[in-house]
Image (cartoon, rainbow, N blue to C red):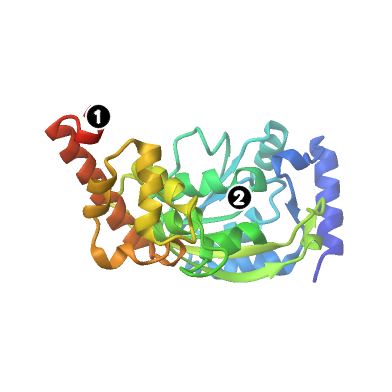
Amino acid sequence: MARGALLRRTERALDEAGISPRRRLGQNYVVDEELISCLVGAACLTGKETVLEIGAGTGNLTRPLAERARKVIAVEKDRAAARYLAEILSARINVEVVEGDILSMDLPRSDRVVSNLPYSISTPVTFRLLKEGAFGLAVLTYQTEVAERLVAQPGTPGYSRLSVMVGLLAKTYPIRSFPPESFYPKPMVGSTVVAMERRGGEGLDTGSLEATLKALFSQRRRVLKKALVVYAKISGADRAVAISSVRAELLTKRVFEMTPEEFLEVDRCLRGAEAEGRGRGPSRSAER
């Protein structure tokens, strides 16, 4: 693990930029050459791609990306870090440093996203990228616990709402895990590099699906039929209509064993049943 030299360079850069890393913002800078090589290698760059990097920090990842990509758009929220990056990378004509918040700014168009994501915003950033981005492949670093949930398969302990939502928007797979010593300052947990091949997600009503998943996963070990009883109570839907709208073979599956596509099917059935119910007016149970 080539850590010493890069750690010293990072500490010197932070000092020159006047930056004090803040743990609550997830500011943990990569100081492991092997992790950097892993991120760059997994991106499969050919020299023709525009790469988006989020949370560029002191440029430890930006430099090797710029050597392999046609262009790198390095987004950094911290003003001092953005100014420092713009100064030290001014000679690299294929690097554009952007000071901004990736959660609120317009997403730059890119072919790849390669980033050591700030831990504090990794999940909302992931969803924004998958919902609004136009890239083909993302290679991102997460806390290992979050990474395990991202790639979890149906029927496994880590399978969750996050697994389902991401599974519908991207094909995900883990690349390699790294210890806390790969970062400065050292986080309390290990990290894992995850690759995501983005899917279209056309016609996906994420708002409706997220509400359905929240209700169903609160009963993750129950069969779907019983979980729909709870869903009906939460949503105010007609229980009989909700259950009858779903394929019979799905009703006997446990919630945590259902595939992302089956959750999507159930959500669409429930939305259709609710729309039909509104068209008929108040149900008998509501009248009573």
Q: Is residue 137 left or right of residue 29?
A: left
Q: Is residue 147 left or right of residue 51?
A: right
Q: Position of residue 117 (x, y in %)?
A: 62, 50
As helix, strand or loop, the secondary structure at mark 1 comes to loop
The residue lying toward the viewer, choosing from 285 and 7, is: 285
Callouts 1 and 2 close, C-beta under 8 Å:
no
Mark 1 is on which residue type? Answer: Arg
Total numbered circles: 2
> Residue extending furthest front?
288
The N terminus, quarter of image = bottom right
Q: Which residue is mark 1?
A: 288
Tell me the residue at 28%/57% (across/down): 265
Residue at position x 26%, y 41% from top? 238
> Where residue 279 sits in the image (x, y, percent)?
13, 33
Q: CA distance from mark 1 to mark 2?
A: 72 Å
- The disc at residue 92 is 2
Q: Where is 102 relative to 30, above or below?
A: above
Residue 24, numbered circle: none
Say what secondary structure mark 2 lies in.
Answer: loop
